[in-house]
Image: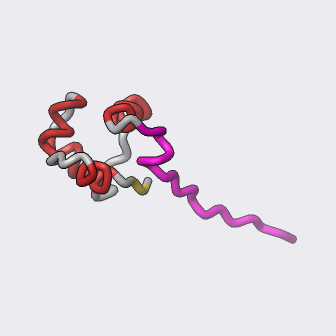
Amino acid sequence: MKNKIKVFRAMHDLTQEDLAHAIGVTRQTILAIEKGKYVPSLDLAFKIARHFQVNIEEVFQYDEPYMSVDID
């Protein structure tokens, strides 16, 4: 899942630690989400979006997995 957390943090002059503290997670969690190594729960994704006062879709972009269709 792609995200713009780093962009929103920069816009609000927040460190990873600042954001983590504000939403109740560790800095390592924020780092992992930003790097795409961890997909946050829906609850956590909403907390992040609410913190920046934007819709969840403005922060997170879901990448649908490529699905092939067999045609005979």
Residue drawn where x is 31% and y is 56% of the image? 7
In terms of secondary structure, what is the magenta stretch mainly? loop
Can you see residue 39? yes
Residue drawn where x is 57% and y is 59% of the image? 65
Question: In the image as oriented, which residue stretches furthest toward the bottom?
Answer: 72
Q: Quadrant of residue 53?
A: top left
Question: Percent x, y for residue 62?
Answer: 51, 51
Task: Report the span colored magenta.
Answer: 54-72
Q: Left or right? Give the position of 63 relative to 53.
A: right
Depicted 30 relative to depicted 50: above or below: below
Q: Quadrant of residue 41?
A: top left
Question: Percent x, y for residue 51?
Answer: 32, 33
Count of numbered circles in the view: 0
Q: Is residue 67 magenta?
A: yes
Q: Left or right? Give the position of 35 relative to 15.
A: right
Question: Percent x, y for residue 63?
Answer: 52, 57
User: Which part of the image, by quadrant, shows the C terminus?
Assistant: bottom right
Question: Percent x, y for residue 14?
Answer: 18, 46
Residue drawn where x is 27% and y is 51% of the image? 11
Residue drawn where x is 39% and y is 37% of the image? 49
Q: How is the image coloured?
A: secondary structure
Can you see residue 41? no
Q: Is residue 31 magenta?
A: no
Question: In the image as oriented, which residue stretches furthest toward the right?
Answer: 72
